[in-house]
Image (cartoon, rainbow, N blue to C red):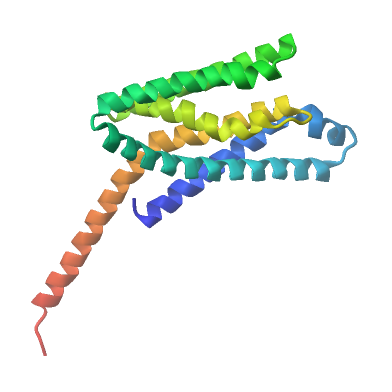
Amino acid sequence: MTIRNWVKFFFKALLIGGAVTGILGIFIRWNDIFSKPVANGEWGEVLAAFVWLVIIGLTMSIISQLCFFAYLTVHQIGMNIFRTLRLWNWVQVLIIVVVILDLIVFRFGPNAETSGQVWLYGILLAVLLVTAFTTAYFKAKWTNKETFISALFFMIVITTVEWLPALMVDAGNIDSWVTLLLFPFLAVNAYQLLVLPKYNEQSDVDRQKLEERRAARKAAAQASPKK
């Protein structure tokens, strides 16, 4: 990917993380940080809270992008170790199953003390899985079917790794934070998986055009009469 296209890729992912967190944060954290300032007409406080959520979303987006490029390295290492894509896919499927079980038994289980929390964590798990399968489906459809397992692995395992600090925090309003932080990770990760080929293709086109311009300038210089 060229620097120009990487900058576009980076800032668009950044905006997605900030926008998702800011907008959903209004609804998810309404009772925590918005309801009182709105009731009192403290619009400066409301704006400050919204900007704060956007900044958190920008931070989550940066984390997602770092994890994405780290996964590309891990994926290549896995291919080199296991030699064949089929074997590496089976390993990824096994890790996916382990991560899902870990989420249910060790993350959601201890925190789900009420029926409302059981429903909340069940819905969050469903959102994670549905988004992951949907993204993997379109990734496979738009590129090739062999990318399905790798995309599923990234959307489930890597998103969970990014999400894990929120799941491990023992603090007040933890449910709202766990809920809120899932969505920017999912949105940015899905965006990165689905649009990366577009930016790679555009980078190839840009390099080709650059080579053509260089060749044209070189030919023009050679054709011009020497004084």
Could you say which is closer to the camera, residue 190 or residue 88? 88
Could you say which is closer to the camera, residue 212 or residue 80? 80
Question: Residue 60 vs residue 200: left or right?
Answer: right
The residue located at (9%, 83%) in the rendering is 225
Residue 122 against residue 22 in the figure, above or below: above
* Quarter of the figure with residue 222: bottom left
Coordinates of residue 206 in the picture (x, y in percent) = 28, 54
Coordinates of residue 20 in the picture (x, y in percent) = 60, 35
Question: Residue 169 vs residue 207: left or right?
Answer: right
Q: Decide if residue 134 is in sight here.
A: no
Judged from this view, the residue extending furthest toward the top is: 115
Judged from this view, the residue extending furthest toward the bottom is: 227
The residue located at (50%, 23%) in the rendering is 99
Residue 204 against residue 60 in the figure, above or below: below
Q: Quadrant of the C terminus?
A: bottom left
* Quarter of the figure with residue 94: top left
Question: Residue 72 vs residue 37: left or right?
Answer: left
The residue located at (44%, 53%) in the rendering is 7
Coordinates of residue 1 in the picture (x, y in percent) = 34, 50
Judged from this view, the residue extending furthest toward the right is: 40
